[in-house]
Image (spheres, rainbow, N blue to C red):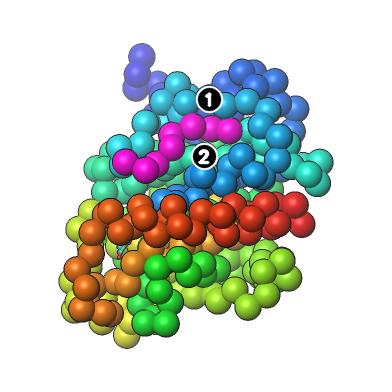
Amino acid sequence: PMTSPEFTDPQAIARNAADAIRSRLSLTSVDMGLVLGSGWSAGVDRLGTTLGRIPLSELPGFFAPVVAGHGGDLVAVALPSGKTAVVLTGRTHFYEGRGVEPVVHGVRTVAALGATTMILTNGCGGLDPSWGPGTIVAIRDHINLTGATPLRGATFIDMSTAWTPRLLEVTERVAPGTPTGVYAQFRGPQYETPAEVRMARTIGADLVGMSTALEAIAAREAGLDLLGLSLVTNHAAGVTDAPLDHAEVIAAGKQAAPRLASLLADITAA
Ligand SMILES: Nc1nc2[nH]c(I)nc2c(=O)[nH]1
């Protein structure tokens, strides 16, 4: 019945998804997983040789993305380094109201495939006036403002080096001068008020978004090394006096696409 564990235990569902992926794409081993957020998914073809592609909605536990500009596929890629990457060109956001499990299902599936590294990318709002649309920032820490967590029970996960220092060093090596910042996840779907942006700045955030922190917690629970890359698509509300709109977000992503693609290619080839 639908109430039995393979339908309710998120780890079992992730194992089901991993089994489906391995069999459909005849994958032997997977080294890393990537989630490509707003603006990033155009870069998947430059990472290496595509081994296969499955619409996410065809896999256990996944949903088709509901946001325009989000892909919605799982793509297996043979990287130049000889490693294999599994790339999710879209994600389920917490604001869709499906609960926290679908939000972190991609990370859990990547872990169930045996990967050891997770790269999370996103589009976000920038709090630093000098980080205009198109700025790429590596995440060095996060603030989870959702009030939620994917963890259940006494799973006291250490988060002191959640964002793997070695991967931040790789990023600096392949793209010297890449700024690093603290990413705050808001629940959304509304953007922040100017007062909420000032609060975020005051508590130490440099970036505001509606993804990534919950996924990071699940990645650390799974023991994955973790790298986060944010594309600033807009100044957060009140940072400048311009209003926010989704068209601007998509445009900034398209304009930055070549740089995002080459950065990901260089990092995953390292
Ligand atoms: N919370 C939040 N999420 C975002 N996602 C994008 I793209 N821009 C923003 C933003 O300004 N605030």
Q: How far apart are labels 1 and 2 at the CA level?
A: 10 Å
Residue at image location 61% in from the left, 18% down from the top = 24
Quarter of the image holding residue 2? top left
Q: Residue furthest right?
A: 82
Quadrant assignment for the C terminus:
bottom right
On whether ligand 1 comes within 8 Å of the CB at mark 1, the answer is: no
Q: How many marks?
A: 2
Q: Is residue 100 magenta?
A: no
Residue 61 appears in the picture as rendered: no
Relative to 133, is 85 on the left or the right?
A: right
Q: Mark 1 or mark 2: name the one nearer the start of the chain.
A: 1
Q: Secondary structure at mark 1?
A: strand
Q: Nearer the viewer, residue 51 or 61?
A: 51
Residue at image location 78% in from the left, 44% down from the top = 80
| SS assignment for the magenta stretch, majority | loop
Q: Which residue is mark 1?
A: 54
Residue neighbourhood size for the residue with mark 2, other residues' Cα within 10 Å, grouped as few (<14), some (14–19), many (≥20):
many
Residue at image location 45% in from the left, 66% down from the top = 134
Q: Nearer the viewer, residue 65 or 136?
A: 136
Residue at image location 47% in from the left, 26% down from the top = 55
Residue 177: x, y in percent? 63, 78
Dot 2 amino acid type: Leu
Quarter of the image holding residue 78? top right
Q: Which residue is mark 2?
A: 88
Write down the region rendered in magenta: 68-75
Q: Secondary structure at mark 2?
A: strand
Residue 44: x, y in percent? 58, 42
Q: Is residue 195 above or below residue 98?
A: below
Dot 1 amino acid type: Ile
